Image: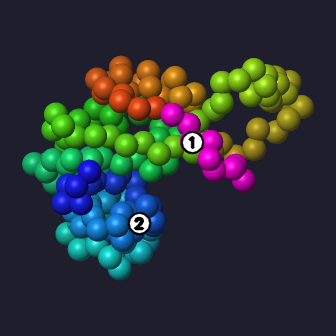
């Protein structure tokens, strides 16, 4: 889009993605972040009035509308119900031509090997042969993510997995 269009990044963290957008000429960038420490880096390139500290949607100006809303790797922290609530709240800040962009690094592959691996891990945990370890959030398949978006009334124009970047 045009570099004068407004962008709201929810759960921006350190603002690394937003810094890249700023370097590309986008100046109408707003971030929401719960941690003042994480938002500190964003203060080096954003106007302080473009930084919303606190929980979304409460901390964002209620009469503000954005052309783009960015979720950069945060959808995994929400279960399906909470994610639906987040999507409903996002709709309060967009207009009919707005775009929601989700960058996710928690999409489960849908091939048989990946499904078997998940099944096997769940069985080993169930029989207490494997310690599940730290809970890191919710992963979804691409189909599940698209389903949740359409269920909330979003029109999904493009949904794909970028295989050009190798996993760790």
Residue 167 forms part of the magenta stretch? yes
Helix, strand or loop under label 1:
loop
In the rendered image, residue 81 lying in the magenta stretch gets the answer no
Residue occupying the point 31% across, 60% down: 31
In the displayed structure image, the side of residue 142 where residue 70 appears, left or right: left
In the picture of the structure, the residue carrying the numbered disc 2 is 20
Mark 2 neighbour class, 10 Å CA radius: few under 14, some 14 to 19, many 20 or more: few
Q: Quadrant of residue 50?
A: bottom left
Q: Is residue 134 left or right of residue 28?
A: right
Give the magenta part as a residue range: 160-168
Location of residue 47 with respect to 87 vertically, above or below: below
Residue at image location 66% in from the left, 24% down from the top: 110
Question: Could you tell me which residue is drawn at 62 percent across and 47 percent down?
Answer: 164
Q: Is residue 75 visible?
A: yes
Q: Which residue is mark 1?
A: 162
Characterize the magenta stretch by its predominant secondary structure.
Answer: loop
Please determine whether, in this image, residue 167 is positioned above or below residue 146.
below
**Where residue 77 sits in the image (x, y, percent)?**
51, 42
Asked if residue 119 shows in the view, the reply is no
Q: Which mark is drawn over residue 23?
A: none
Q: CA distance from mark 1 to mark 2?
A: 19 Å
| Secondary element at tag 2 | helix
Toward the viewer: 126 or 112? 112
The extreme left residue here reads 63
For marks 1 and 2, the one nearer the N-term is: 2
Vertical order, 2 against 95 (above or below): below
């Amino acid at each position: 889009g045009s570099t004068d269009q407004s962008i709201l990044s929810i759960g921006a963290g350190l603002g690394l993605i937003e810094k890249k957008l700023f370097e590309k000429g986008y100046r109408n960038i707003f971030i929401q972040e719960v941690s003042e420490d994480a938002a500190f880096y964003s203060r080096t390139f954003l106007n302080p009035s473009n930084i919303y500290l606190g929980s979304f949607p409460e901390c964002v100006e209620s009469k503000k509308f954005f052309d783009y809303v960015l979720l950069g790797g945060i959808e995994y922290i929400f279960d399906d119900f909470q994610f639906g609530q987040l999507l409903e709240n996002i709709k309060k800040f967009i207009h009919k031509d707005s775009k929601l962009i989700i960058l996710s690094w928690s999409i489960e592959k849908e091939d048989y090997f990946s499904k078997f691996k998940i099944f096997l891990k769940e069985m080993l945990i169930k029989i207490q042969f494997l310690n599940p370890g730290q809970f890191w959030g919710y992963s979804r398949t691409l189909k599940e993510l698209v389903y949740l978006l359409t269920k909330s009334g979003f029109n999904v124009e493009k949904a794909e997995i970028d295989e050009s970047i190798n996993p760790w």
